[in-house]
Image (tube, grey):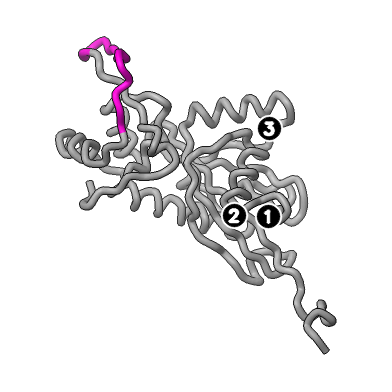
Amino acid sequence: MSDSATPSLHPSVICTVDVVLLTLRDTRLEVLLAQRDRAPFEGAWALPGGFVHPQEDADAAASATRVLREKTGLEAPYLEQLGTYSGLARDPRGWSIAVVYCALVPLEDLEQALHRRSTTRPSVARLHDAANLGRLPFDHDAMVAGAIERVRSKSQYSSLPVHLCGAEFTLPQLQRTYEAVLGEPLNKVSFRRKMEELNVLEPVEGAMQGGAAHRPAQLYRVREAYRQRLSMLERGL
């Protein structure tokens, strides 16, 4: 008998995408969780996610982009694939595979998107301290831990933390962002030399940020070519 005649021998595999969306509040990484409105784990807080739509999504990245847009209203934040999680035990509905993405978003952009979203539907998404989540449904706590480890490791040798900054920022603000992600202070001279090597920044012409105790500082922004991708260092910070 052919395989096509015995579909019961090949039960469907659940295929989803989940997004670990991280932002920075002061010196603390926070992750966006959404309250589940259906079983399993109805009412629990979990990562934004959803089923792949094979007739609509060109690939897994398109699925993740769509899920973020539907759940948060965000359009095109920095997004990279973190990995896949699979098996029989992770979902009570059956054997499943989740393609997991990590997204970085400036706090102001995320809060504005969530506010706009709340004007059209009740908000069921909130930010949580990424380091103190406890147990989450499925294996979402492991996904968050993996994303934090990836972000901290990659920040040693890439431009990744720039995606946690706003549209315009000073070099001291960017250095504080790196330090918050890495959890350690950085030498100012070495940091600025590495930023020059990365070559991802451009000054905003005529734009300065003043301060009561310091002379005005030049404002910078990410060059267009690096707004959706990274620049890498040969040697880390």
At horizontal 21% and vertical 14% (from top left) the residue drawn is 214
At horizontal 59% and vertical 54% (from top left) the residue drawn is 60
Residue 209 makes an appearance in the image: no
At horizontal 66% and vertical 51% (from top left) the residue drawn is 57
Q: Quadrant of the N terminus?
A: bottom right
Q: Is there a contact, CB below 8 Å, between mark 2 and mark 1?
A: yes
Q: Which residue is mark 3?
A: 123
Q: Secondary structure at mark 1?
A: loop
Question: What is the x, y in percent for residue 43?
Answer: 72, 46
Q: Nearer the viewer, residue 76 or 93?
A: 76
Q: Is there a contact, CB below 8 Å, between mark 3 and mark 2?
A: no
Q: Nearer the viewer, residue 162 or 143?
A: 162
Question: What is the x, y in percent for residue 75?
Answer: 57, 35
Q: Which residue is mark 1?
A: 52
Please say whether residue 204 is one of the residues in the magenta stretch.
Answer: yes
Q: Earlier in the sequence, mark 3 or mark 1?
A: 1
Residue furthest to the bottom in view is 1
209 displayed left or right of 133: left
Q: Which residue is mark 2?
A: 60
Please say whether residue 152 is one of the residues in the magenta stretch.
Answer: no
43 displayed left or right of 86: right
For the residues marked 3 and 2, what is the alpha-carbon distance in whole angstroms? Answer: 26 Å
Q: Is there a contact, CB below 8 Å, between mark 3 and mark 1?
A: no
94 displayed left or right of 21: right
Question: What is the x, y in percent for residue 164?
Answer: 42, 35
Question: What is the x, y in percent for residue 153?
Answer: 34, 53
Q: Earlier in the sequence, mark 2 or mark 1?
A: 1
Q: Residues within 10 Å of mark 3 (few under 14, many from 20)?
A: some
Q: Amino acid at mark 1?
A: Val
